[in-house]
Image (cartoon, rainbow, N blue to C red):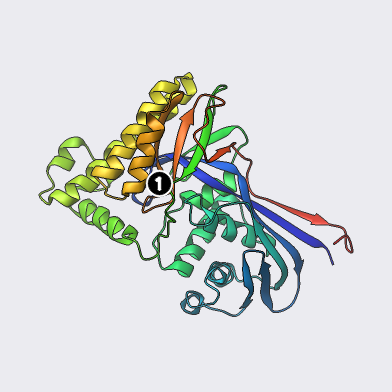
Amino acid sequence: MAVVEAFAPGRVNLIGDHTDYTGGLVLPMAIDLGTTVRGRRTGDAVRLASADDATPAVVPLGIDGAAAGAVEPAWARYLAGVVAVTRPRVGFDGTVTTTLPIGAGLSSSAALTVAVALALGFDGDATDLALACQRAEQVASGVPCGVMDPLASATGVAGHALLIDCATLAVEPIAIPAGASIVVVHSGAARALAGSAYATRRSECERAESEIGPLRDASAADVASLRDPVLRRRAHHVVTENARVRAFAAALTAGDLPAAGAAMTASHASLRDDFEVSTPALDALVARLAATPGVHGARLTGAGFGGCAVALTEPGVDVGGWPVRASAAARLGFSRPGSA
């Protein structure tokens, strides 16, 4: 029986937060930290042991979506979501390990669902995989999350960020210029979308769209016509953030790192003031990063509510945290029977 090994990278979103679920633009980067699932396809359940939790996950193949969100331990709900959505024909017995910090906003949950889906034999292209894993995470967490995270993990290109149109799911690799470094720094406060105001923010965007149409196509005048000041701020963020994603991608392509950094800093201000998803710890961290010589720009990453900031820096600038590199896409491998 062959040994299966599936790896899925996490991601850092360089710019474009809370735009994905309105069909807007995002620019994440798959990173060289990720999650590995290793074992054998066998049996009538998915059984995974984790080095980070003494309690193993055991998910029967017949589980449905309604039951997935109640599985224990809590991380096993993501496995249950994958099983409920993809309906594998055979179970799995193995281990899961990760180099991603949990609760940092680097998409550890999407990396887990993508790696599990591949290990279980998901049959489809990268877009199909991302959509299935998006649905699996929604089933597992109850959060109406967008498609950016699993799509970045499934389509990553080494040395490149990914300009993603979340309406068409088109992915355009954007090269990271020589002389640019990406550093992720934790704010000290863990992030969890479940229990946060994420669903409320999405609902507010939907209410704005019910009045002025799709936010990806809205103009400044459309936004100004919204009577509710809260909805107006939410829509203003989405419309201006889509423009910043385009400006950031153009700046990277031109090798204009100061312009790219300025877009990042403006993005953080919009997430803080218009979308209200930052925290005092994130604001203080971004201010410190932006004031550091050699840092072009910084912003929160991963939807906010805690977690990490990302900085665009000159090489060798020490701001703490993790320097990350652009990674290739998730992958699946096999070893000879008896090799492990």
Assign a secondary structure to mark 1.
loop
Quadrant in the picture for residue 178: top right
Quadrant containing the C terminus in the rendered view: bottom right
Q: What residue is disc 1 on?
A: 167
Q: Which sits in the foreground, 104 or 76? A: 104
> Is 236 above or below relative to 292?
below
Quadrant containing the N terminus in the rendered view: bottom right
Q: Residue at x 41, y 33 (%)?
A: 289
Residue 62 in the image: x percent, y percent? 60, 80
Amino acid on which disc 1 is placed? Ala
Does any portion of residue 278 appear in the rendered image? no
Q: Which sits in the foreground, 224 or 262? A: 262
Quadrant in the picture for residue 179: top right
- Judge the density around disc 1: few (<14), some (14-19), many (≥20) Cα neighbours within 10 Å: few
The number of discs equals 1
Q: Which sits in the foreground, 87 or 179? A: 179
Does any portion of residue 167 appear in the rendered image? yes
Residue 248 in the image: x percent, y percent? 41, 29
